[in-house]
Amino acid sequence: MRSLGTLVIVLAVTAGAQAQSSSPGPLPDWSGVWAMQGNTVFDRASVQPPNGRAGDAGVRESPPYNDEWEAIYRRNIDRVKAGTFADPVSTCGTPHGFPRIMNVPDVYEFAVTPQTTWILAENGPGILRVYTDGRSYPAKEDLWPTYTGASIGHWEGDTLVFTTVSLKASKDNDVIVDRTGVVLSDASHATTRMRKIDADTIEARMVIEDPKAFKAPWAVTKQYKKQPAGTWAWDYACAENNRNPITDSGKTLTLGPDGKPLDKKVD
Amino acid sequence: MTSLRLQIGVAITAAMVLVATTANAHHSAAMFDDSRIVELKGVVKELQWTNPHVWLQVSVDDKGARKEWSVEAGSPNTLSRNGWRSTSFKPGDAVTVRVNPMKDGSAAGNFIGAKFESDGHTIGRWN
């Protein structure tokens, strides 16, 4: 069930989107293939230890969690240490979701049209649709929490500004922000400002608010570097040969070529 | 015929511990011990050029018995953009492969680099 807070956000953003639905000027050229910079820690500005990798025991960031959600995060960090903080995308069945879709390896493509911008993540694969055609969010009875949510935006010059709502909350870590253990509640929503800061760099500044989990907004910036001309993006058929299933305890197994676990202890 | 030996080495250097993060794009890497490097000298059995991970199957001599190791690498997508081909490893190639091994000692690891006995060329991180 969606929260009242999320409904308020939906209505507020709807009004904002409608007010700014006038035709944009020339749209920026975001063509080509791009790669997210750095490892997959979501907030690299606060990660401890510096340059720590998501999934390594002890690595943590500093989302502005309240006490209740800080305790949840600490439990997740303990699960990372124990090797039982499973990555839900290992099942090859669900998308990364937002905001994680902005923070995945492999490459990206950005398809910009006046009506819609598609953020296409090769890894996953994942698609984030940002509608800039002046539409409103669906009525509350037609909107339900999803992994990637609902995004409506507008152009401010060369900057795409969009707000993402109706995000599926983490329940038993079935959707995560990254492998350090960061998760969000069903009250989370975010406003992203995305623009090209030089010929080869696109920057996405996200401000994530989560009235249930955060004491303050969480600002995180990601950058994407343009890859050499002619770079290809490919299929990412996750289920093609997934040799890493998850056990009920959250352990990630490693299968041999015969499909049987190589792990000496399965659970 | 290549002399097949399994060399368990603990040759830690700061540079070599930094395995390619793309190798773990799809799942937790908790099973790998990135503080250890194992050097496998053997013969390629198969390269599974598939998503979400490429897998290199290597037949290694372990105290006189053949032992097959499963070596996990990144996605074919990113590896192909970094010089790999689906034919980079062919069945029968004599290779030395360096991996971060599984913590539990099972015959699998996370790919770091490989050197081919035929001409000494390398793939991945080697120096």
Image (spheres, coloured by chain):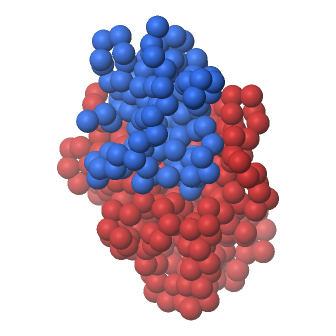
Q: Pick the residue in front: B30 or A231.
A: B30
Q: Position of residue A180 (x, y in %)?
A: 51, 66
Which chain identifier belongs to the red chain? A
Q: What residue appears at the point 55 percent right and 25 percent down from the top-left corner?
A: B60
Q: Position of residue A190 (x, y in %)?
A: 50, 70
In this rendered view, identify the residue nearer to me: A111 or A183. A183
Q: What percent of the width, then of the height, locates residue A238?
A: 63, 37
Question: B25 above or below A156?
Answer: above
On screen, residue B24 versus residue A248, left or right, reads left
Against B82, residue B23 (above or below) is below
Please give left or right for residue B10 compared with residue A100 in the image. left
Say whether residue A213 is visible. Answer: no
Figure quadrant of the C terminus of chain A: bottom right
The N terminus of chain A, quarter of image: bottom right
Q: Residue at x 51, y 78 (%)?
A: A209
Residue A148 to residue A30: above or below:
below
Q: Residue at x 62, y 62 (%)?
A: A83
Which residue appears farthest toward the bottom when viewing the image? A67
- The answer to whether residue A73 is seen in the rendering is yes
- The blue-coloured chain is labelled B
The number of callouts visible is: 0
Residue pushed farthest front?
B63
* Foreground of the two, A133 or B75: B75
